[in-house]
Image (spheres, rainbow, N blue to C red):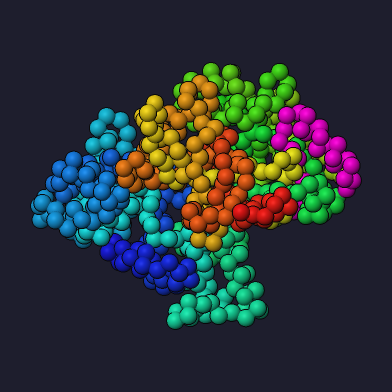
Amino acid sequence: MQYSVLVGVYEQLEATSKRLEKTFILSEFLKSADNLDKVVLLVQGRVFPNWDQRELGMAAKLLVKALSLATGAALDKIESVWKETGDIGTVALELTKKKSQATLFSQPLSVQKVFDNLQKIPELEGLGSVDRKVQLVAELLTSASPVEAKYIIRTILGELRVGLGEGTVRDAIVWAFFGDKAGVKYDKATNELDLSDDERMNYDKYVVLVQEALDVVNDFGEVAKIAKEGGDLLNVSLKIGKPVKVMLFKKAKDIKDGFENVGKPAACEFKYDGFRLQIHKFAKIRLFTRRLEDVTAQFPDVVQRIAKNVKGDCIIDAEVVGIEKGKYLPFQSISQRIKRKYDIEEMSRKFPVEVNVFDVLFCDGKNLLKMPFIERRKILEKIIIQVPFEIKLAEEIITDDESVAEKFYRSSLLAGNEGMMMKNLQGIYKPGSRVGFGMKVKPTMDTLEVVIVGAERGEGKRGQWLASFVVAVRDPETGEFVEVGRVGTGIKEKVEEGVSFEQLTQLLQPLIIEEKGREVKVKPEIVIEVDYEEIQKSPTYSSGFALRFPRLVKLREDRSPEDINTVDDIRDLAESQRGRGELK
């Protein structure tokens, strides 16, 4: 397939803001697309599936070099135009229109060629690797039409801007390959999906089918391919060594609300203030964070404990907590271990951890996702050899008594934990879902987890740093990020005091995708936790809400942008303020 065909789809998608119309455009394309597994990734602006740790990792400055090499334009001219337009993709389009380099040997780009060149980028390491990366991109740009150049640049930056959320891609797979069975009847003139109540229930059944398969395999391309070939999505299984989305939990108002949601009796567990690890034990051991990052190398101590104290091949879900003299430490005390690349052995001694195992997804060849929680817990009791302060099962009681649950909850807080989990004994494991099989009980209103999408350069003594950060939550309907405010407090000027302006600047600098004056737009990747005084209605931000006096609490390197709070959460929290006075 020619890349120009895919680019034509990008342009159609970018030309409409209507979600159903986007779904229709993409579904029609998928029906006849070649290289389906690759096309489904590229249409999301990706070249690797969610579970794959490889990243292109090319900052905009390198793309400026590639553009110069491909078009003959001077570096300073490209940077000047980029700062004027704020979009290096648009710069690529304009420069390619009037490129001065000879293109006698260029040929039309294929999807395969674009995909192959981009996938080679992370493989290049060592001396001269930066130049070779630039050459791989320049090779594509030399053969690209102006509009193709624009989308190649945007794909590399991970900022395609065609408005495709994961939900839209999922629905497009349903429309393309289950359209007749699901009863899809899209009226393009009215932009409506015309379904009766019964038809809607049938349609939703196929949406759930595709979503559950996606949650297990974490690969839109693989799911689309299985669907097109008539494979069995209902029974796609876990693959040990390949991470799966973890099950998420809603927040209960209190213990009574928790019981109402999960039923009685319920399993009550300590809710630890650590970070989540999905542990795969087979011929080798691999550790994945909640955002599916492989952190095996950073935790040799955990690897040793798993090898010694876990029986058989399995996938287990655990919370790793900092521990000192038998007492639990807050998340910040061990968070720096997640990204550590050097002095790892020293860090493991300096910041020891305890592994608290609370679930099992796969054991000795058996997929346990549909097994009731109470049975999964029994399996854990058989396969985990518990060693105090090293590895153990999460503290648990089973009760139907609110006073007993309250006492257990208080004991968890006294031990230095965040609160308590309450779980339905018959609940299955639903990857990626907050479905009510488990609830978390915490003593205070939740802080918010948000992603940084922009920043402003500081002035005066903060002139060398980014100093004010635009934050966003996720719109669950479109998958896009909508702004809720700016954060400038809670950030330290000295690195040794906590999360600093310098640290955030270093993290965000490679993610800059637009730059206008002192304002920059960044790829949404860095997640932070914030608290705030209240939530107000606001026309200023795209969410329709604004956080009043937001303050950074901590950096959440264990969270991905897909894990952050949604605009629905903001709306619910705003409504809950009404008891304290009308929402402003």
Query: Which quarter of the image is occupied by the C terminus?
Result: bottom right
Q: Quadrant of residue 315?
A: top right
In the image: residue 559, left or right of residue 580: left
Q: Quadrant of residue 356?
A: top right
Q: Position of residue 57 (x, y in %)?
A: 36, 41
Residue 196 counted in the magenta span: no
Q: Position of residue 11 (x, y in %)?
A: 33, 65
In the image: residue 311, left or right of residue 70: right
Residue 218 visible to the viewer: no
Name which residue lies at 15% across and 43% down.
74
Number of marks drawn: 0
Is 380 above or below relative to 499?
Answer: below
Nearer to the camera, 220 or 250: 250
Name which residue lies at 42% across and 44% down.
454
Q: Position of residue 50 (x, y in %)?
A: 48, 49
Which region of the structure is painted magenta?
400-428
Residue 414 counted in the magenta span: yes
Is 48 above or below relative to 505?
Answer: below
Q: Quadrant of residue 458?
A: top left
Q: Position of residue 516 (x, y in %)?
A: 32, 45
